[in-house]
Amino acid sequence: MTQQEWPLWEVFIRSKQGLDHKHVGSLHAADAAMAVQNARDVYTRRLEGVSIWVVESKHIHASNPDDAEAFFDPAADKVYRHPTFYDVPDSIKHM
Amino acid sequence: MLTQDFTNATATSATEPSLLFPFVLQLADTSLILAHRLSEWCGHGPILEQDLAMANIALDLLGEARSYYQYAAELEGKGRTEDDLAYLRSAVEYRNPLLVEQPNGDFAHTVVRQFLFDNYHYHLLKGLKDGPDTHLAGIAEKSFKEAAYHLKWSSEWIIRLGDGTAESRQRLDKAIAALWRFAGELTTPTPAETALQDIGVVPDYAALLPAMQTYAAQVLAEATVPEPTAVFAQQGGKTGRHSEHLGYLLSELQYMQRTYPGMTW
């Protein structure tokens, strides 16, 4: 019998209603249903979540670290892209 | 806290404590022994994820066992504690059905044992949580959600092993052949259980069976496994007649309390 490793899955957990799903780690599983169940057993043992997403790792395409300079450095001197140049009226709370 | 619970239970239930005690103890022993079996997998699971899954189930069952032991100790009223009941009784005094003391075997054996137990456990708790004894109903209510997940877990694995590779199928078939005979005891009432069923404290097992059988048939069909033909039900555990496996299990489970009596963490 050939030994086949189960594929790797990335796990995203939403900790509370209204919050985003956050990446928490990865695990092995034969298919999506098993991945969700394994994620429940591995990553929600301490009441960490109310919802689970899993994505097979091979479907995640990442930026190349070699491109980091070209990708990210140009944003460093463009402070005007932050909405920090407005005066907030006193009557607006919670900003 | 304990006194308050006891008062509640007696105030809301007319059940004789002496009648209820052996049944609650049986539930406690059943959950404790299966929890111990599952905990034997810890660090030896086929993959990390399933190692954790089995440890999770073991912990759920251990928590449930504690609640039952605490209640049993109160019902008995002779000053024994939950620890005395769990750690200082001999094998013949244990009231767990034979199924749960069966060795882990390979993963398929563990899955089949778990599936047979979960299917019974889920349906039993479903009945108990609406029962007249509020203390028992409270424990059942909490454990029912856990049991629902356990049943989902073991059902998924029956399906995966049955409809998986030639090897997984062969292992599942072997496990079914070895363990199916222990299912009958779960729903065969002892005289103590019958007495409680007569007064409506424990659900009538005959009434639970159709739902259990329908569910099992559904899972087996999805697993492409033919339903096992009726087998002679191996019984005895619930009346204290155990297989040799329980003695070995208890010698490990009780080792610390027997060697260092009264020890605490």
Image (spheres, rainbow, N blue to C red):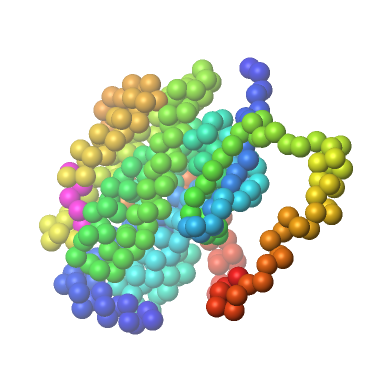
Quadrant assignment for the N terminus of chain B: bottom left
Q: Is residue A28 left or right of residue B185?
A: right
Residue at 12% from the left image edge and 57% from the top image edge: B198
Q: Is residue A56 above or below residue B144?
A: above
Q: How many marks?
A: 0
* Magenta stretch contains residue A29: no
* Magenta stretch contains residue B205: yes
Which of these two is toward me, B185 or B53?
B53
Residue at 65% from the left image edge and 42% from the top image edge: A26
Please report the bounds of the magenta region as a residue range: B202-206
Which of these two is toward me, B44 or B143?
B143
Q: Is residue B175 above or below residue A20?
A: above
Residue at 26% from the left image edge and 74% from the top image edge: B9
Q: Position of residue A64 (x, y in %)?
A: 80, 36
Residue at 86% from the left image edge and 37% from the top image edge: A66
Q: Main secondary structure of the magenta part?
A: loop
Q: Position of residue B202 (x, y in %)?
A: 21, 57
Quadrant assignment for the C terminus of chain B: bottom right
Q: Is residue A65 above or below residue B263?
A: above
Q: Quadrant of residue B99?
A: top left
Which of these two is toward me, B73 or A73?
A73
Q: Is residue B135 left or right of residue A53?
A: left
Q: Position of residue B207 (x, y in %)?
A: 17, 45
Q: Is residue B79 above or below residue B121?
A: below
Q: Position of residue B261 (x, y in %)?
A: 56, 72
Q: Is residue A79 left or right of residue B122?
A: right
